[in-house]
Image (tube, rainbow, N blue to C red):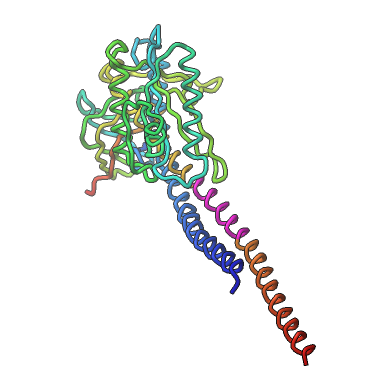
């Protein structure tokens, strides 16, 4: 299965980047799940958690406040003013 | 000790003390450049992502939005200046102010009213001394910019931009800051932030690459509304970081030449002091010899 390239960036640094099989984020409209091959999307994020499932099935959780999400060509960028990895 | 010699010794001491200070400042700046540069680099991904998203929305949607459309008549333009809080950084702040003055002349010749927003104590002092009005001033922390400051500035500016010109809002936003090219070069730069024009770092698609047609959630207009402040903030933050890195680089350069200059002064004054001392000794010898001669003739 094709993989997603995910980057999580905050205003002053790049928080996380790597390959993933699925990304789940909370937009202002509700939760959205993104798999490889998703159509190009630009969505506004609501405050909340972003769950990134990497190809081995491990889940990375990141807190992202006040930002947006863009998807294109299997590249997912999560941009937030403040973002950090949640310590699970 | 002769009077002349004492004066030279004083001057040497003064130059040595100055050199100690300038040398210390030079070293401090040198170590801070690295950190500031690293921060510029670290904020790169964010501003790239934001810029990309903005250009995506601007290019792939044909909605009329305040962000992308140019008002038919521009009445008032805001100029945002980024200077330093402290001096002793060569022409750092002067360059920005000069560039801003040129911009002002240009904008006025186009029949636009110019309002100023200032960052840094140096710009504030320049405006206060000339009794020029500034809309708002932010001082403190130019050496180590905080994102919160960028946010505050962004909010103020965006609020003004959304306000119609008849109610005191602005139609155009320009920023003037020192762009950090390298440790030896910093270029004062004028960029028009809004309305959007050529966006720095936009990735133009290759010949065969088809740009994606975006789906927006919730709506194109809402996405733009949310992106506008984010974009402005990220550009302002970037300008602040670049400016901070440039400030340290400019200060290091200025302090290095000051230290070199002090060195030169010390060398010159040491030569003069040696001369004066030798002259004194020569005079004393000739006085002794003269005196002895006079005595021996009498006998």
Image position of B8 with respect to B221: above or below: below
Q: Is residue B243 left or right of residue B259?
A: left
Does the magenta stretch mainly form a helix, a strand or a loop?
helix
Rendered location of residue B243, percent (x, y): 44, 39
Question: Residue shown at 65%/72% (left/top)?
Answer: B277
Viewport quadrant of the N terminus of chain B: bottom right
Residues drawn in magenta: B249-265
Foreground pick, A88 / B17? B17
- In the figure, residue B281 lies in which quadrant? bottom right
Foreground pick, B269 / B83? B269
Residue B257 forms part of the magenta stretch: yes
Rendered location of residue A7, percent (x, y): 37, 37
Rendered location of residue B6, percent (x, y): 57, 68
Question: Residue shown at 61%/59% (left/top)?
Answer: B265
Viewport quadrant of the C terminus of chain B: bottom right
Would residue B264 be visible to someone looking at this image? yes
């Amino acid at each position: 299965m094709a993989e997603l390239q995910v980057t999580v960036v905050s205003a002053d640094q790049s928080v996380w980047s790597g390959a993933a099989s699925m990304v789940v984020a909370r937009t202002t409209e509700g939760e959205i799940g993104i798999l490889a091959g998703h159509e190009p999307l630009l969505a506004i994020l609501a405050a909340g958690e972003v769950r990134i499932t990497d190809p081995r099935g491990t889940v990375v959780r990141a807190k992202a406040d006040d930002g947006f999400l863009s998807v294109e060509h299997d590249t997912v960028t999560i941009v937030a003013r403040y973002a950090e990895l949640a310590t699970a | 000790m002769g009077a002349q010699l004492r004066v030279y010794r004083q001057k040497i001491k003064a130059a040595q003390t100055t050199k100690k200070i300038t040398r210390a400042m030079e070293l401090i700046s040198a170590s801070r450049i690295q950190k500031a540069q690293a921060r510029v680099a670290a904020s790169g991904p964010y501003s790239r992502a934001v810029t990309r998203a903005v250009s995506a929305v601007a290019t792939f949607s044909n909605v009329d939005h305040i962000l992308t459309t140019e008002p038919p008549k521009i009445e008032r333009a805001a100029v945002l200046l980024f200077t330093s809080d402290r001096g002793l950084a060569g022409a750092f702040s002067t360059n920005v102010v000069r560039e801003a003055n040129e911009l002002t002349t240009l904008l006025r010749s186009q029949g636009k009213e110019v309002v100023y927003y200032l960052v840094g104590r140096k710009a504030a002092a320049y405006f206060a001394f000339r009794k020029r009005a500034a809309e708002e001033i932010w001082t403190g922390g130019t050496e180590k910019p905080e994102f919160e400051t960028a946010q505050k500035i962004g909010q103020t500016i965006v609020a003004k931009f959304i306000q119609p010109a008849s109610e005191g809002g602005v139609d155009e936003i320009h920023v003037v800051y020192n762009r950090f090219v390298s440790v030896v070069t910093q270029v004062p730069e004028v960029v028009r932030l809004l309305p959007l024009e050529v966006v720095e770092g936009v990735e133009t698609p290759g010949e065969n690459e088809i740009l994606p047609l975006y789906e927006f959630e919730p709506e194109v207009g809402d996405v733009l509304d949310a992106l506008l402040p984010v974009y402005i903030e990220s550009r302002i933050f970037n300008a602040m970081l670049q400016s901070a890195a440039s400030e340290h680089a400019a200060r290091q350069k200025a302090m290095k030449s000051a230290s070199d200059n002090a060195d030169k002064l010390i060398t010159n004054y040491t030569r003069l002091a040696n001369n004066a001392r030798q002259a004194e000794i020569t005079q004393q010898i000739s006085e002794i010899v003269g005196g002895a001669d006079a005595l021996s003739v009498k006998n």
